Amino acid sequence: MGNILNQIGIENYIFLSVLLFCIGVFGVLYRRNAIIVFMSIEIMLNAVNLLFVAFSTYHQDAEGQIFVFFSMAVAAAEVAVGLAILVSIFRNLGSIEIDKLKNLKG
Amino acid sequence: MEKNLALVLLLSPFIGFLFNVFFGKKVSKGLSGAIGTIAVVVSFLVSICFFTQLNQNGKGFEISLFDWIQVSNFKLDFGILLDQLSLLWLLFVTGIGSLIHLYSISYMHDDENMHKFFAYLNLFIFFMITLVVGNNLLVMFIGWEGVGLCSYLLIGFWYKNQPYNDAAKKAFIMNRIGDLGFLIGMFLIAYVFSTLNYTEIQTLVIKGETNSSLLSVAALCLFIGACGKSAQLPLYTWLPDAMAGPTPVSALIHAATMVTAGIFMITRMNFLFDITPDVQNIIAIVGAITSLVAASIGLLQNDIKKVLAYSTVSQLGLMFLALGFGAYNVAVFHVITHAFFKACLFLGSGSVIHALHGEQDMRNMGGLKKYMPITFWTMMISTLAISGIFPFAGFWSKDEILMTAFEHNTTLWVVASVASLMTAFYMFRLMYLTFFKEFRGTEEQKHHLHESPSLITIPLIILAVLAAIGGAINLPGSMWLNHFLEPILVAKHEAHELGAHEFMLMGIALAGAIIAIIWAYSKYIKQSFVPKEDTQMVGFYKTIYNKYYVDEFYTFLIVKPLNGLSNFFRTTLEPALGQIVFSLGTLANGISNQGRKIQTGSVGLYLFAFVLGLCAIISYLFIAR
């Protein structure tokens, strides 16, 4: 493991992670389809996970990897709930365009 | 055994109350009344049972039902004390109570809420028994408040009539003033002695290691309580108004039993009052003045029940006079005889009112003697008794009071004697206006005149017999009552020796009463005088007829300023405070209305804000480093 990290270098992992995160952020900001927004959020989450794993290896410390397992488990649950909400929204409104979700207007 | 019997005594009327409250409406009126009556008769029989037992043993007993309050060194149990004093009271409360329940079955038969009436009456008897049999002041206070409540409920029994409701409220509030005195007195006693149990207080008082100035205040406060309950100056005005209630109520509560609670309490605490002579003086003076003032108002009243009400206040004043001189046994004697003849008079007046379908004004009566002979004769006997004519019950008891007064203070004796003469005068005025001459009511009323049914006349006859011979319990010579009460009185009261002096006093009282009667006779029979219409009253007559304007004075002094203050609070202070509270609300409302606009509901915008915030936080973290 250490070798792989040595060959590629920690900086590249960080760049990849930042890139993924930014893709996620722009996806969230620009796309109007709720499912894609959702996927973008997942990408952001995985960018962070990747960073965790990379630093974990870099520091020779397993805690970060354990934490990623937790984070993935929670993300799975969150996806289940999130998709359920989206299905419910679709059934009620016939659309999952987030521009149309204005019921919360104060 | 004794405990169970005592519980039967106490709870029997309460069970009657519960029955009439929950099932009274479902059963027939006769059954409802019968159960109410039986509940009280049971208590009466148990009282007799205890009484004979007491006569054999010679001393009373105390039963503790349960521990009630225990705070540091203050301990109180809920107990029953059945001794000479409480048994005497029980006998006439439940005895007269039974008769009046019986009477009410017929009297209230046309009322749609008869079961409610009996429920209240039973509740009253229950509380009165509690008041009497308690072994400490707090238990007495439960009964004291309870009878006040029942009095309120029964005065306002015909609640659809607003003046009756006002009378009920007045009685309640006046009593509250007195009750406050009672409470403060009780607190002081608890503070000084760390107990409220009669026997324990008595022991401590006799030991005499106490702060007497505090005790004087306590005694005075207790006396104020008695003033409220027993309608003494300056708290007497509720009693005449209490006549708004049905007549059996006036007879039972506002003549025979509840209003004597103050006398009972002072007699119960006699050891306390014996060591506070200043308070005793106040009691005597208040009693004498009350008896005179009330008697003089009674002279000119035209409502038959009002006359009797003022007569009650006046007689209670005489009892307080005796209490003030430390002659507790004399006061108790008068309480008992008064209960007999005043109950009879009220029930008689109820019989008259019943026959006239609710007419209470004596100016519209007259000539009822031939229509209602039983009512007439029973009332006549009671009138002779209250006027103090030999040998009826009132003669003996009133004479004892006058003799006691003469021994201690001649001025108060004169005042009390004048009050007694007035009593004789207005009572015969009542009799002459009601039963003699020609009937002055309408033709239709005359057509319906009849003697009341036997359920009404039987209690009348029994009470009249008692009013005639009731004096026998304390005849000079035997003095049964004095000997009977000796164990509970600390200071010994010497019986009057029958010397020339006493016979002279008796003679003066008797002659005065007879002169007053003759005077009434010449005015109302010979000259056929009928009181004028209200509007034609002039001068001093008018002042007396309007009860010395005491009610108006109280209205002016207390009610008006209080109303003014309440009005000020309502119209000025409350809106001002409300404005402050409201403006806070308006402010919050305005702020949130502005804040509302941020919530556009556009998810994209939210996400943008979220990313922006995230960036801000991250850059802050970098820059802060």
Image: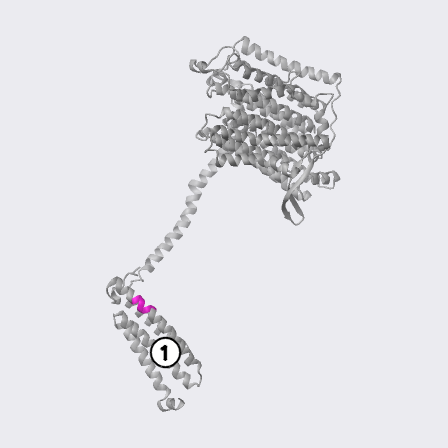
Q: Quadrant of the C terminus of chain B?
A: bottom left
The reply to whether the magenta stretch includes residue B34 is no
Above or below B236: residue B373: above
Please provide percent x and percent y for residue B496: 74, 22
Give x and y (percent) for residue B75: 66, 46
Residue B221 drawn at (x, y percent): 63, 36
Q: Nearer the viewer, residue B360 or B391?
A: B391
Image coloring type: one colour
Quadrant in which the N terminus of chain B is drawn: top right
A46 or B412: which is nearer to us? A46
Residue A54 x, y percent position in the rendering: 38, 84
- Asked whether B575 or A28 is in front, the reply is A28
Outermost residue on the left side: it is A94
Residue at horizontal 37 percent and vertical 81 percent from the top: A51
Using the rendered view, name the quadrant where residue B490 is placed. Answer: top right
Q: Residue at x 37, y 90 (%)?
A: A4
Q: Chain of mark 1?
A: A
Residue B430 appears in the rendering:
no
Q: Nearer the viewer, residue B132 or B606?
A: B132
Q: What residue do we see at 33% from left, 57% from top?
A: B593
Q: Is residue A83 magenta?
A: yes
Which stretch did the figure color magenta?
A81-86
| Residue that mark 1 sits on | A48
Indicate left or right for B443 with A100 as reference: right
